[in-house]
Image: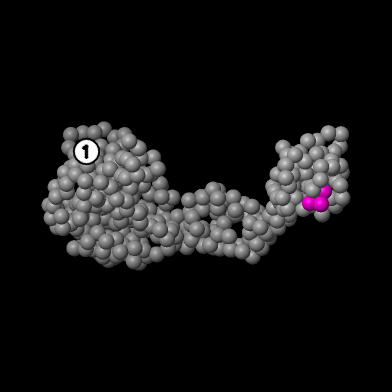
Amino acid sequence: MPSLNDARDLVLRNVTVLGSERVPLLDAVGRVLAEDVVAPWDMPFCDNSAMDGFAVRMADCNDSLPLKVIGYVPAGGTTDAPVQPGCAVKIMTGAPLPAGCEAVVPVEDTEEAGGFINLKARVLPRQHMRFTGEDVKRGEVVLAAGAVVGPPQVSMIASFGRAFVSVHRAPRVAILSTGDELVEVGEPLAPGKVINSNTLSLAAAVKQLGAIPVMLGIARDNRECHREKMAEGLKADVLITSAGVSAGDRDMVRGVLADLGVEQVFWRVDIKPGGPMTFGKKDEVPVFCLPGNPVATMITFEEFVRPALLKMMGHTRVLKPLLNASLQEEVRKKPGKIKFLRVKLRSENGRYLAYSSGDQNTGMLKTMLLADGIALLPADRTSFAPGDEIAVHLLADYTYLQES
C-alpha cells in the first residue's frame, strides 16, 4: 500500500501533458500557454508622453520667462513640428513626442494664458517621457510557454495585436457513479435510495479547474452496465468513477476495468478517509476510482485528481502549498495512516489557527462545507494537543480567512 506522497508521485508520473489548440484570447483565460509569445515590435512603439502637459526644451526651463505654445499633439495624433527655442508644444498622454522635446511638464505644474505658459515647478531632464522599447524590446519573449493566462497576460498579448493564442487542451473528464441505491437529482427519493450528488460535485470540481466534465450517469450493479458505461468513459481523456472500489459483493469496478484493459497502478493508499482509492491507466487515459462516500470522494479528488488534471493542462505548479497552522483543540487518531482532518482556519497576529470544522465522520457532508482546509495528520502519530503545529492544504482562498 503506497503512502500519500508515493501514490501521488505514481499518479503524476503516469499522466502526460495534453496537446495544444488555438483559441480566442478571452477563451485562454485560466489556461496554460503552449507557445512562447514574442514581441513583434517595441513597446512603447515610439517615444511618447506619460502625462497631459507640455513638451519643452531644458534650456528654456532655467529662467522665469513664459513659453509660447506653438502646437498641440493629441493622443493618437502626430506632429512633424519640433519644439522651438522659447516655445512649448501641448501634448496628451500617449501622444508621440515632438522632435526637440527634452521633458514633459504636467498641466498642473503650469499656468496657461493668452497662448503662453509659465512654469510653476522645477523641471527635470526626461521627466514624464516614455521611450521606444522601454517596456518590451522587439523579439523579446514576453511570455514563455507554460505561463498561465490571466488579465495581465491578456493585456500584453492584446497589446501586440493578437486575437488568438495557442494553449494546452482542456481534458474531457468522464464521470461515472455506481450503485443500485443511487437516483439522479430530481427523481423521487424512495426508502433505501441515495441521491447521486457525487457526479455533480465531481463535475463542479472538474469545471472549476477549467477541464470539461462529461457526466455518464449511474452504472447499476451488474457487469454489463458497468462495462458499457466504463467503455464509453475510456473514450475521454480521463475517467473518474465513484463507489464500488472496495471488496464487497457489488464492488465490481476494478474487475470490469481490468476486463477493459485498464492496468491497475495501485489499489488502496495509507490515508483516511479515502483509503480504497484506486488508480489505473489504459494507454494514455488515466483512471481514478474514488470511494463513494461524498466526503471521501471530494478529498481524494483534491489530493490526487486535481494535481493530475492540472499537469495534463500544462501547469507546472500542480500541488497546493502547505501552510502551518496551530491546532486549537485536542485530536486523536489511530496509527498507521495519514488522517485528513477538515478544519476551519482563522488568522491571528500573522499566524493561522486551526479548528475542527465539525464531526469528522465521513458521512458528515456539512463538515466539508464548513472547512477552509484539510489538515494532514502524520501516520505515525496518534494524538495532537492544542498548540501543536499542523500542515494544512487550503480549500478556501487564504486572503479571505477571518482575522480575529
Residue 175 x, y percent position in the rendering: 33, 50
Q: Residue at x 24, y 59 (%)?
A: 4
Which corner quadrant holds the N terminus?
bottom left
Provide the residue span drawn in magenta.
56-60
Tell me if residue 106 comes above or below residue 337 in the rendering. Answer: above
Residue 300 as seen in the image, left or right of residue 329:
right
Which corner quadrant holds the C terminus?
top left
Q: Residue at x 82, y 54 (%)?
A: 100
Q: Nearer the viewer, residue 141 or 259?
A: 141
Q: Nearer the viewer, residue 178 or 140?
A: 140
Residue 397 x, y percent position in the rendering: 38, 44
Magenta stretch: dominant secondary structure = helix
Q: Is residue 327 visible?
A: yes
SS of the residue at dot 1? loop
Q: Which residue is mark 1?
A: 358
Tell me if residue 65 comes above or below residue 281 in the rendering. Answer: above
